[in-house]
Image (cartoon, helix red, strand yellow):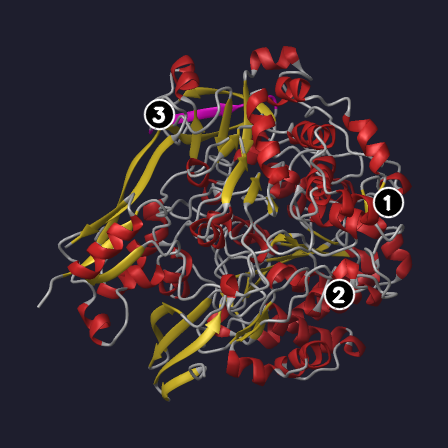
Amino acid sequence: MSTPWKTGTDDDFVVRTTAWSAPGCHPVGCGVKLHIKDGKLVGVEGDEESPITHGRLCVRCLALDEYLYHPDRILYPMKRAKEDRGKDKFERITWDEAFDTIVDWVTKTREKYGYQGVAVMGGTGREATLFYPVLSYAVLQTPNCGTPLSGASCYGPRCTVTNYLMGAGYPEIDHAAYFPDRYDNPEFEVPEYIIIWGKTPLESNADGFFGHAITDMMKRGTKIITVDPRVTWLGSRAEYNLQVRPGTDAALGLAMINLIIEEDLYDHEFVENWTYGFDELKERVKEYTVERAADITWIPKEKIIAATRAFAKAKNASIQWGVAVDQMSNGLQMGQTILDLAALTGNIDNPGGITLAPKASLTGKWRYETIRWVNPELVQNRIGNDVYPANRSALTNLLADPYLEALETDQPYAVRLMWINSCNPYACPGAVPERWHDAFLRMDYVIVQEAFMTPAAMGLADLLLPVSTYPERDGIVLPHFGRNSPMVGAMNKVIAIGEAKSDFEICLTLGRRLNPEAWPWETVQEFLDFQLVPNAGFTFEELREKVYHQPHYEYYKYKKGLCRADREPGFETVTGLFELRSLQFEAWGDDPLPYFMEPQYSPNSTPELYEEFPLVLTTGGRKITSFHSEHRQIPSLREIDPWPIVQINPVDAEKYGIVDGGWVGIENQFGKCRQKAEVTPTIMPGVIHACHAWWYPEQDQTEPNQGGYKKSNINMLMPHFHVGPLYVGAPYKCLLCKVYPVQGLEE
Amino acid sequence: MSKQGLLIDYEYCSGCHSCEVACRKELGLSVGEWGIKIATIGPWQHDDESWEWNHIPIPTKLCDLCADRVAQGKKPACVHHCLAFCMEYGTVEELSKKMEEKGTKVFMVLP
């Protein structure tokens, strides 16, 4: 019998709940007990009854009080005159005034520019990931819904390739999370090996995976192989570290496939019965010998061979891929090789392999379906669709690079009303920060929906809407946004601070005014019941009581007719098989087989440029103290990671006069910024790794400084529109640069 | 009465800092004050290419082993929240036995 969700008295009580941003995080749904006294949060403790986290919490939830009650939080709707953008001249208003103003602006923008004159820009990971598409489609009825991330280079590419090859949701490591008794469940077997490929799961907890499940499994015998330019802490405990030259992972994947086929280490049963295109793949990978891969990737040949054999000979093994897959223009093919490796070794839907789930579920499914509220002609002619037709079916968002150009030029049509929802576009994801900043300033009206004052909020907002944190709202946590959810968690409202509303509450109120047909629910609970009752069989109140729900997991679904809509055995693809040769890739005009392509700027593709910029630049490794550009103002977290860090090998540090802890100028043909050096042997020679999304809340937030968003922003060195053949994938992780010592942060 | 201490399995301490922040909140400390703090050895590489890289949480004089929590039947805040579950609380005798069972990369600390 579990502890009741709420215990104590009316003014002194503890509530069990699950966490999802804000504070910024992925939908892991960590179990939290919040102690509220006289209306104030006085204690945070991990819930030991959580089947996912068992009482553990990371520093971001432990420092929750510093976030909730921080003076930079936005707690009330505020307006500001357009001519005062960038100045601290906000005026508090009521929600009624805010909603009336929005309705006015939407109406007059539609009259003049059509429904497509309105646009939504959404941030990642937070609950907004589910609701900014809904805001766009079901409330504002505009097709212009996107993020500022060039090449859609986060998560989307991995989902796309999974969809093409195996017609499934997100392929996550089996960490027994579907089972209440977890690792002790008799059906589960710990993976003998896990390849961690381009990811730091302990720090990122990405997309709904509780990172330290990896250490849990290591204690139970799992061995680790990493593929990463850095030896991470996890790598220091790994059996093999394949330190790959950033952007060349597909060459490694191809050579591993080749070796597995050559040495007959593949799973014949799986390949013969459940895959399509094996012979063509076998032919293709012959080009990629281990010697050639070693030459391309800078990984010693012996290490590639040893790691490949260990992985392929394991009884069961899993692979976890990270955002590195998405952040190169060859990323879809890199992803293709990784899924192929799992398939060839039969590590799909088996105990301790990769879990297989439907493409979407619950609110994660509903958000896509809301596209029906947008005029289909507008959806078909969405910005970028003419150049990248694959987007019509594969991605639900419009494409950031053509989106930016449209905002700058009013072509193919003018966008005049911009709604930025939980996104810090030019201090965080935007590849060309200054261009995004200037493009937004062209808008007639900008709404910013945020939890904190950010460069975008201060720089742009004509109307500022406060977003609630998880203790301030009812809702559900859906790991992997419904693409593979081993648990559904209740977010139980316990507290009210100011007048912040959840993304859903804002959608609901405004939806009922602008598009009432799409919004039949009167309350949040009615909506949650609409989601939960038919799909999961219980109400929100019932979920609230038990806090966590774990659906049953069935292994080998593809053998049992549980993957396809027609209930035949196999996968939900055109051939009904796992497609080693992808018909979808072919249909969209790309090679159906995986291939390697050098990064646009690299020692091999641009040798002359490499003389001027002699280091490979990779970016964006995660820190546990922040979620992208969030948390920079939280004292306990900033104390742990006070500055943006660029990691450089001692050999390169000596060559370029860089000292540990000193400030470094990082520069290439696109721009420059400054970060502090960490001289460390863990980063491979010839490569530097720089942190992303740094700005300084302690500095002047108003124009022109805006929290110094350009000073340490590594995206100042990113190019615009350097994407993969099917649009997805941009080189955030593989460019060239030079470094030099500088005196400090300021020029 | 036997003395109590903390067992640290530093094979698995990932340096996540949860112990530090959990402790600060439990003891009501300010930024800059620590009841426990992580010290880091390495990273450097041995001749056989293996890595020496260990995080080791060390309690300060402010640590009272969460006497209040323990009195309520709870674990100390650091032990409870440790993401890698690499800390344990117990008597010197209990922890000594566990250290012997673990055999390597483990130590005990009495604050």
Disc 2 secondary structure class: loop
Residue A396 placement (x, y as % from top left): 77, 54
**Front: mark 2 or 3:** 3
Is circle 2 on the same chain as circle 3? no
Closest to the observer, B73 or A219: A219
User: Does A406 sit left or right of A179 as displayed?
Assistant: right
Q: Looking at the image, is A558 positioned above or below residue B50?
A: below
Residue A663 sits inside the magenta stretch? yes
According to the image, label 3 marks what residue? B46
Check disc 3: other Cα within 10 Å, few if <14, some if 14-19, many if 20+.
few
Alpha carbon of mark 2 to alpha carbon of mark 3: how far? 60 Å
Q: Which mark, by number, is residue A179?
A: none
Residue B24 placement (x, y as % from top left): 26, 59
Chain letter for mark 2, please: A
Q: Residue at x 63, y 14 (%)?
A: A609
Magenta segment: A661-669
According to the image, label 2 marks what residue? A140
Amino acid on which disc 2 is placed: Leu
Amino acid on which disc 3 is placed: His
Residue A590 placement (x, y as % from top left): 85, 35
According to the image, label 1 marks what residue? A584
**Front: mark 1 or 3:** 3
Indicate the quadrant containing the C terminus of chain A: top left, top right, bottom left or bottom right: top left
Closest to the observer, A738 or A56: A56
Closest to the observer, B82 or A659: B82
Is circle 2 on the same chain as circle 1? yes
**Front: mark 2 or 1:** 1
Chain letter for mark 1, please: A
Q: Residue at x 42, y 78 (%)?
A: A15
Disc 1 secondary structure class: helix
Q: Looking at the image, is A341 positioned above or below residue B100?
A: above
